[in-house]
Structures are given as C-alpha cells and as structure tokens.
Image: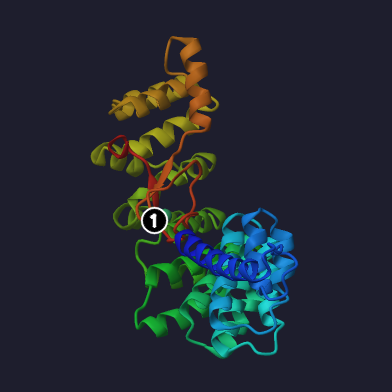
Amino acid sequence: MTAALLVLLVAGLLVAWVLFWRQWQQDEEPPSIEHDERISPLLRGINYLLTDEPDRALQEMVQVAKLRSEAADVYMALGEMFRSHGEIGRAVRIHQNILARPDVSSELYLQAHFALAKDFQTGGLLDRSLRHYQKVLDVRSDHLDALTASLRIREQSSEWLKAEALLSRIERLQGDEDGLHRAYLWGALAQDAMQAEAYDVAHEYINNALNLAKNCGHAYILLVRLALKKNDAEKLQHALSTMQHEAPDYLHLLMPVLLKNNVCTDELMLYCQEKNDHELALAWMEEIATHDVSAAVSLREKLAFTPSGLRESLRLAAMGMNSDQGFVKEAKKWRLSMKHYGCRQCGVQIVDMRWQCPQCHQWGSMAAITEDDN
Ligand SMILES: [Zn+2]
C-alpha cells in the first residue's frame, strides 16, 4: 500500500508541477501553488501532504467538488496511510468526507464504510466499527471481510452467541464447517454460565463443545471444574481420563485446581510417569513449590524427573531447586516473564495461556512451549 501510495503521490505531484510550469511559462511569473485557482484542491492537498501539513492537506482535499475515480483512489490510499500510522482521526475524516458526498458510487460507498469500520476498530471504538461493517453487510450480505471482522469484534467483546451466528454465516459462504472454532465458542459460553453458577446450562454447553470437537481443551477444563464443583468423583475421573487421550496438552492447566481440591490421583501420577509428560510434571512441581519446596523436591524424585534442557532447568531453579540463591533469584525473575505458550499456527509466543491466539485469532492453537520449540 505504501508503494502504491508513493506512486500516486509522485504522479499527483508531477501533474501539479506540469500545471504549475505551464502557468509560469504563460505569466512569466511563478504563481504559488496555494493561490493558483486552476490547480485542483486535490493537487494542492497532495502538495501540503508532501510538505508535512496533513491537516491543511485534508482541508483542501475535502473541497474536491466531484470525486472522480482517480481522486477516490488517492483518498482511499491516504486513509489507509493515516490509519497505518495510527492517525485514526485523520483517516476517519477522509472516509467520512467521502460518504458525505452526494455523488458517491455504490462501490465507493462500500469501500468507505468498510474503511471507516477499520478505522474505528483500530481506534478501539468497537460499537461504531460494527455499525459500519453492518452498513457494508446491509448492501452486500456476503462480504466475507466484513463478516470476519465483525466476528473478531464480537469475540473480543465476549458476545459469544452473536459470534456464533456470524461464524454460521461465514461457514455457509465458505461451504465449510469449522467445528473447532464453534466448539471453543460453546466453551466460552459454558465458562460464562459457570461464572453465573448456571451449572446445568454450563454442562449442556460443554457437551455441545465436545460433540463438535473432541479435542476442545477448554471444554475439558470446565468439565473437570464442574465435576469438582458438584463433588462428583466418578465424573471427575471420567473427564480426566478422557482428557488424557483427547486433549493431553492441556492437562497441566488443571494442576492448580486439582491440588487445591486435593484430588491429584494416582492415575495422574502414573500417566505423568508413563507418558513422561514434562509439562504436566513441571506444572505439578511448580504449584507445590509455591508453598513447599521440599515437597516439590520429593515429587520430583517420585516422578524421576530429569530436565531435558536449559529451559526446564531454569524452571526447576525458579522453584528453588538450586543451591545458588543468587541464581534462584534470577531464575524466579525470568520465570515470571517466561513466554510459556506458543501458537502452532502463527508462532506468536505469550506468557499466559489463551484459548484464542491474540495474533492470528485461531482457537485452540496455543500450546506450552517445549525445549524442542526453542
Ligand atoms: Zn496464532
């Protein structure tokens, strides 16, 4: 976009210069671009932009009486440029100005509403952004980018049912079902229901999620929490053993709640030893070490845990399992900001677990980073 914009600006400047030169030849006195009536406000605007006076540029350019398609392209490119530089107010002014004109073509109307929606989304004004995406969808209900952007905003605002409805529209357009995505939306709904203590509703949502995707980690975590809440040992056992098969990457997330409820079963110990699940072992030891380092050391012996690299050694040191206290202090500091999870899809690394990647927005793509990932 920047390259295209540069070409546009240079082309505009050349035209301006030719007009300017002709005028000079005729009058033998160089007029100033600012006062030459024959130079269009658009070109004057470009001149102001090049002399780094964006507000004067905008002032000139909004005076362009009729939007020819080239001028519209320049406008749209400028709006993109302002937005990408974080100058949202200026981007909004450009796009609103396009929409305020009586002669806007239907295509430009769509483009301007879409751009305005992106401006507001970038500026964090999500309601206003949604309104403009809706304007696009009112005209073209199959506008995939507007649907996808609206879905992101609904997810960002935790409006899961609305997100789910948008996902259905996207799936219909693409002729493809995204069961994992929908499962995670049901997971998010289940979590809200749990928080509202609507446990039966939560259970139903969890079942919906697991019927859609057997590996929906969030649903298992909630299923375990629900069983603990209801003191249902049988359901707890079942949830844990299913999770060991279907979503083992997330078992370690349960350690705090399992230990708090004193239900770290022999079966889990066996699983940890048999599968040599380092993440589970580390999470288990870390949780115990927060209040009893010697108990964590005993657990380490029981699990016969040997760190497989520097990262795991540092995590052990951060628990206090090192005789050098200075080193332990540094390791603890490192552990607090340790990038623990990475996205399998886009590779972004983050400190705390999330069910949706903050960068590529994929659901269920975050996993604990292992020694091999580094
Ligand atoms: Zn990602």
Which one is in front, 61 or 273? 61
Q: Is residue 194 visible?
A: no
Which one is in front, 217 or 157? 157
Q: Quadrant of residue 161?
A: bottom right
Mark 1 CB within 8 Å of ligand 1: yes
* Label total for image: 1
Residue drawn at the location 33% of the way across and 50% of the way down = 248
The residue beneath circle 1 is: 365
Which one is in front, 15 or 274? 15
Which one is in front, 174 or 305? 174
353 relative to 345, above or below? above
| Residue 96 image point, x, y percent | 70, 75
Tag 1 secondary structure: loop
| Residue 135 image point, x, y percent | 62, 83
313 relative to 152, above or below? above
Q: Quadrant of the C terminus?
A: top left
